[in-house]
């Protein structure tokens, strides 16, 4: 149903204004994918991302999930120890069916992005009429 | 190339690859999705302030009601259970990578914390806990008199 695509995207891509992006790592978010009846559900863990930092794009059947982290730094504190790193999230999947982006339901709660993709309506066989010359 | 005595990471650990392989193997054969290495999950970050400390940890998918925190003297414990994945006869699973199960982690802080002055917040899957030192535990300034 959803085949994974490895992206070549890295964080050190220059931005249009010539600045390089800050050096935050990009992680592959853990996902759960299941089908239930007519819908496919994708759950992706993106802790530390605010809902406005989520970007879901669909281009030529490639569904890209992107989360831009809001760095969490308590004011007036200095870092003592770190066992985990914060970073952006990026993962892409190739969908087997044609799905309209507008029909995807997206919700973000408690650091988890939930996408509901409806199963495409029965693909209509395309008929090509051959004209007699 | 000169090896600096102050960069311990530059030195090549011959067992590092082995450990990494072992970790990878454990992940493959670990059928349950319970977080591995109990006692060290979840990973936490610490920040230090004047008389307080901030701890943060990433717990995506949990709600405030799924996390339980207890503090005694200088020991802080976080306990939580990931909500069960959706179940149903008509569910066909493709991938299950997100953590499941329950965890408990206890962390010993370098000082006692005032249990009445703990501020715990949970936002966007990140738990942030601000803890204060009790008033009578703070270092006291001592006036030095000229004799």
Image (spheres, coloured by chain):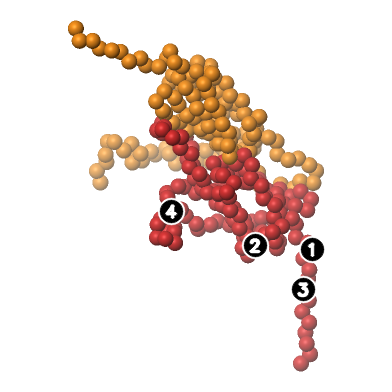
- Between circles 4 and 2, the one closer to the viewer is 4
Q: Identify the hue of chain B.
A: orange
Name which of mark 4 and mark 2 comes first in the sequence: 4
Residue B69 x %, y %: 58, 24
Badges 4 and 2, same chain: yes
Name which of mark 1 and mark 2 comes first in the sequence: 2
Pointer 4 indicates a residue of which chain? A
Pointer 1 indicates a residue of which chain? A
Q: Circle 2 is placed at which residue position?
A: A61
Residue A67 x %, y %: 55, 49
Badges 1 and 2, same chain: yes
Name which of mark 2 and mark 3 comes first in the sequence: 2
Name which of mark 4 and mark 3 comes first in the sequence: 4
Q: How far apart are marks 1 and 4 (CA)?
A: 43 Å
> Quick one: label 1, few (<14), some, or many (20+) residues within 10 Å?
few
Does A89 sit left or right of A121 as displayed?
left
How many numbered marks are there?
4
Chain letter for the part of the structure drawn in red: A
Q: Circle 1 is placed at which residue position?
A: A122
Q: Distance between the residues labelled 2 and 3?
A: 19 Å
Q: Distance between the residues labelled 1 and 2?
A: 16 Å
Q: Circle 4 is placed at which residue position?
A: A21
- Does the CB distance between marks 1 and 4 fall below 8 Å? no
Element assignment for label 3: loop
**Can the viewer see residue B139 in this picture?**
yes
Element assignment for label 1: loop
Residue B114 x %, y %: 50, 18
Q: How far apart are marks 4 and 2 (CA)?
A: 27 Å
Q: Is residue B133 above or below residue B127?
A: above
Q: Circle 3 is placed at which residue position?
A: A126
Does A108 sit left or right of A126 as displayed?
left
């Amino acid at each position: 149903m959803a085949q994974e695509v490895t992206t070549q995207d890295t964080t050190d891509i220059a931005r249009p204004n010539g600045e390089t992006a800050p050096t935050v790592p990009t992680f592959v978010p853990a996902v759960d994918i299941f089908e239930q009846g007519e819908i496919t559900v994708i759950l992706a863990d993106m802790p530390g991302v605010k809902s406005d930092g989520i970007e879901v794009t669909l281009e030529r059947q490639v569904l890209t999930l992107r989360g831009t982290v809001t760095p969490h730094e308590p004011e007036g504190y200095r870092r003592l120890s770190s066992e985990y790193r914060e970073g952006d999230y990026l993962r892409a999947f190739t969908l087997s069916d044609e799905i309209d982006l507008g029909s995807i339901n997206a919700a973000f709660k408690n650091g988890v992005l939930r996408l509901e993709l409806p199963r495409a309506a029965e693909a209509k066989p395309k008929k090509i009429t051959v004209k007699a010359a | 190339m000169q090896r600096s005595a102050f960069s311990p990471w530059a030195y090549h650990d011959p067992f590092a690859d082995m450990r990494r392989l072992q970790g990878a193997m454990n992940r493959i054969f670990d059928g349950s999705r319970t977080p591995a290495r109990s006692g060290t999950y979840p990973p936490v970050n610490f920040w230090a302030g004047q008389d307080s400390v901030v701890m943060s940890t990433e717990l995506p998918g949990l709600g405030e009601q799924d996390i339980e925190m207890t503090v005694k003297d200088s020991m802080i414990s976080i306990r939580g259970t990931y909500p069960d994945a959706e179940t149903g006869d008509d569910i066909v699973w493709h991938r299950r990578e997100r953590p499941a199960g329950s965890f408990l982690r206890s962390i010993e802080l370098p000082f006692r914390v005032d249990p009445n002055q703990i501020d715990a917040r949970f936002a966007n899957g990140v738990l942030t806990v601000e803890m204060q030192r009790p008033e009578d535990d703070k270092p006291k300034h001592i006036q030095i008199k000229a004799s």
